[in-house]
Amino acid sequence: MHDKEDGGPSLVSTRTMDIVVALLLLVVSAIVITDSTRLGFRWREIEGPASGYFPFYIGLMIAISSVVNLVRAIRSGERNKTFVTKQAFRQVLAVLIPLCFYVLVVGWIGIYVASAIYIALFMWYFGRYPLLKGAAIGIAVSAVLFAMFEIWFLVPLPKGPIEDFFGF
């Protein structure tokens, strides 16, 4: 399968993704409906709706919509319509993998230091800015965010050893 726009090979078809998403939403709706029945989903005299009333009907609507989408996807004749090409998926991963790493290191080095490093590397790699310029902007943004959250709003965010060293 090749996408006609960029000529890149297809990684996955739209039909496949429609089926996968419909099945995932069916699982989620089944969980919501099951838990709502445990809580009670009927209208109670004098009290009004039980705890699971609204989640039950929202889950039911999601389930019905998912079944409709699943049937439409299975019956669809568009088996070769590209959802994502290999090149586009690589670009998504180039952003997603560093973002996951950023989220993991926030707990160890704190959000401000991790953000400064993330911004600097992102500017250097994707923006093709000099690393020093990216570092300066990353540090400046983190300093402004530190002042805003920690000093002005008094909202503590995860800090690491550098903030501890400076007594914050």
Image (tube, rainbow, N blue to C red):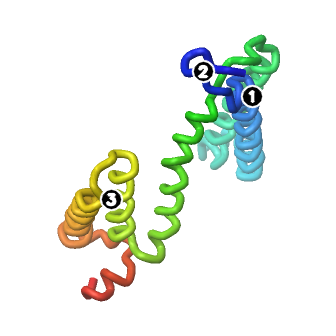
Query: Which image quadrant is residue 57 in?
Result: top right
Q: Which residue is mark 2?
A: 7
Nearest to viewer (mark 1 / mark 3)? 3
Judged from the image, the secondary structure of the residue bearing numbered disc 3 is helix
Instruction: Name the residue type under label 3.
Output: Ala
Relative placement, left or right, of 163 versus 56 is: left
**Mark 1 / mark 2, whichever is N-terminal:** 2
The circle on residue 120 is 3
* Residue 68, image x, y percentages: 74, 21
Q: Which residue is mark 1?
A: 16
- Tell me if label 3 and label 2 are in contact, CB under 8 Å: no
Q: Nearer the viewer, residue 5 or 51?
A: 5
* Residue 82, image x, y percentages: 66, 22
Where is 129 relative to 58, above or below?
below
Relative placement, left or right, of 152 versus 3 is: left
* Residue 137, image x, y percentages: 23, 58
At x 81%, y 20%, the residue is: 74
Q: Residue furthest top?
A: 77
CA gap between label 1 and label 2 equals: 20 Å
**Mark 3 / mark 2, whichever is N-terminal:** 2
Where is 154 relative to 44, above or below?
below
Instruction: Name the residue type under label 1.
Output: Thr
Nearest to viewer (mark 1 / mark 2)? 2
Judged from the image, the secondary structure of the residue bearing numbered disc 1 is helix
Tell me if residue 106 can be seen. yes
Tell me if residue 145 can be seen. no
Q: Nearer the viewer, residue 129 or 74?
A: 129
Judged from the image, the secondary structure of the residue bearing numbered disc 2 is loop
